[in-house]
Image: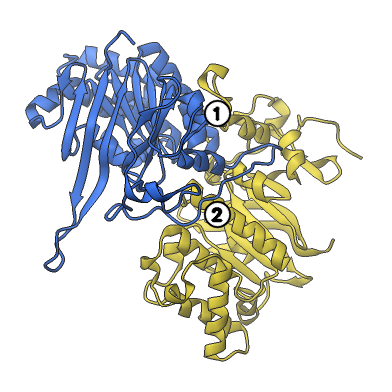
Amino acid sequence: MTAVLEVQNLEVSFASAAGSIRAVRGVSFVVEHAETLAIVGESGSGKSVTALSLMRLHNAERTTVSGSIKFKGTELLDAPETQMRSVRGNAIGMIFQEPMSSLNPLMKVGDQIAEAILLHQDMSGSEARRRALKLLIQVGIADAERRMREYPHQLSGGMRQRVMIAMAMACDPEILIADEPTTALDVTVQAQILDLMRELKTRTGSSIVIITHDLGVVSELADRVVIMYAGTKVEEGLTEEIFSHPAHPYTLGLLTAIPSLDRSRHDGPLTEIPGHVPSPSQIRAGCSFAARCNRSSSICFESEPKLEAVAPGHLAACHHKRGKPFP
Amino acid sequence: MSEPALLEVISLKKHFPRPRTGFGVREVVRAVDDVSFSIARGETLSIVGESGCGKSTLGRTVLGLTPPSAGAVWFDGWRVDGLARPQLRKIRRHFQVIFQDPMASLSPRMRVRDILAEPLVNFGIVKGRKALDARVGELLDAVGLPRDAALRFAHEFSGGQRQRICIARALAPEPSLIVCDEAVSALDVSVKAQIINLLVNLQDKLKLSLLFISHDLAIVGHLTHRIAVMYLGVMVEIGDRDLILERPLHPYTRALISSVPKTGKEASKRIVLTGDVPSPVNPPPGCRFHTRCPKAFDRCRLEEPKLRSVGSQRRMVACHLDISE
């Protein structure tokens, strides 16, 4: 396997009236060729900020990004803007949570997709439109020829997300970044979109980075998982491994806190994680999860735990992680 | 059941006329179309369905926040639909509501003490400053907030704590029914469990009835006694939790349940529906689900199925298919 994307020690902070806010604090991960990596976390964990910084979509004046983001060996963080433009939407495609606010309301959807193609590829307008039509059919839009000529507001939520996917796939990207792609959708439509993403991945062989808070979506789609909490990576491993043997108490908490269809109130209360996610300005020394953790001891409040392997490819940052450190 | 139901909703309809366009017949959105159900004391009935199925409108109509177009709502022996405001206000202390977004339902200018004291004063339940403060303290205890929260404003709390304030306010007038409209949907995963456990505990302790409106089947599955499934303004299946979740009969219920992503190793075999929910302005004739139903046949396109008991008396299904448990 070869790494398509290598993120090393990523730090993102925002300037604010109250001082600098560190939203992402030293996160590293690798996306292999043709794999689906899920970045999981709650609000404020820094997962969306991480996704945006992969594409350098931050307001450059207020954001400081450091570390390294390498796309097939090329450093993106200090690349000139012109080079970034040839990467965005071309080598790396992106899908956002709310398709209505990401699509241009004044442009017909066919033209929007064609625009993305024309920007990056040497094609004539009519060729680009033919390609757009083909993409719409591929993402399962019925009556695609008519839909091409419609505006985003004329489409349903599920169809808009399909258009977003068609646009992101327009230039055959090597990586597709999907930031909460199904959160705004109904479950029956979510099932359709998840199927579509799986199908596109097997057909095109592109890698997918999916950002989500929904562990159900993770288990359906992802090969590997990165769990984030308060701006740091707390655990990483193969999806099956994480679900069956979570090493970090936060991961275990997340897994047992979610209600499932085969548990009723007679099976007792859900496991609670006390307290709430700290905001970036509240983060103190030591482990950021210590105050909510049932395993925490004095060391947790003093020193920040390092990421250590508990099994090959399975890392966790916890002083009291389950399992002995793997040599 | 020997005890009469606390809430009884009979053939409730809520239609919204659309703005007139041209000379044609004025269009009507049939948000809720002939829905009936009842809730016993201490029971949770959950209304599930996708966006636009009418579940929130149903909740609002039951609460009297919007008058029904037809049908009746009986609450604890009173007929509460179509009541004039002064009468409705007197009865309203017995049924309260918790909405999805706590920040939008708490006044940013009031201290928590005043937010919780307001219903107590309005309904004339507690009089005198001392008694009020004591009751506010009890309410904060009940929802697991520190007593010094009383002096703070809503924006000083996290999302989960704000929802606790909303729950405390709903509990203040000692209601017998609380309508929860997506009450935990906006919360983070780790906080969601806290609020769900709190609701279940309070219900058991206070013998509350809950009308729990949600799109999240996993949450519903955890806390409910009975489930009603809505599609495009009509109820397609209603019954005990175990029956609906473990042996769903209506093709829509089956697809809905199989669409829920599962955690864990078991490979889920999904029924993926094609298309989207049609518009409630012009719902399909016959069975409203026939355009997406994998099992639709001729009769489904012509005749609207009525809810009928299937198997035991604990479940009703609206479907023409020859289904049995």
* Residue where numbered disc 1 is placed: B246
- Answer above or below: position of B100 versus B138: below
Q: Which chain is blue?
A: B
Q: Nearer the viewer, residue B309 or B166?
A: B309
Could you tell me which secondary element the residue under label 1 belongs to? helix
Q: Picture coordinates of residue A83 (x, y %)? A: 65, 80
- Which chain is mark 1 on? B
Q: Which chain is yellow?
A: A
Residue found at x 70% / y 66%: A203
Q: Are marks 2 and 1 on the same chain?
A: no
Q: Can you name the residue that lies furthest to the bottom here?
A: A124
Q: Label 2 amino acid?
A: Gln
Residue found at x 33% / y 49%: B302
Q: Can you name the residue that lies furthest to the right here?
A: A327
Residue found at x 63% / y 79%: A86
* Residue where numbered disc 2 is placed: A192
Q: Residues within 10 Å of mark 1 (few under 14, many from 20)?
A: few
Q: Nearer the viewer, mark 2 or mark 1?
A: 1
Q: Nearer the viewer, residue A203 or B285?
A: B285
**In this rendering, does residue A21 appear at all?**
no
Answer with the quarter of the image where residue A30 lies.
bottom right
Q: Picture coordinates of residue B186 (x, y %)? A: 44, 41
Could you tell me which secondary element the residue under label 2 belongs to? helix
Colour style of the rendered protein structure: by chain
Q: Picture coordinates of residue B132 (x, y %)? A: 23, 16
Mark 2–mark 1 distance (CA, rounded to whole Å): 22 Å
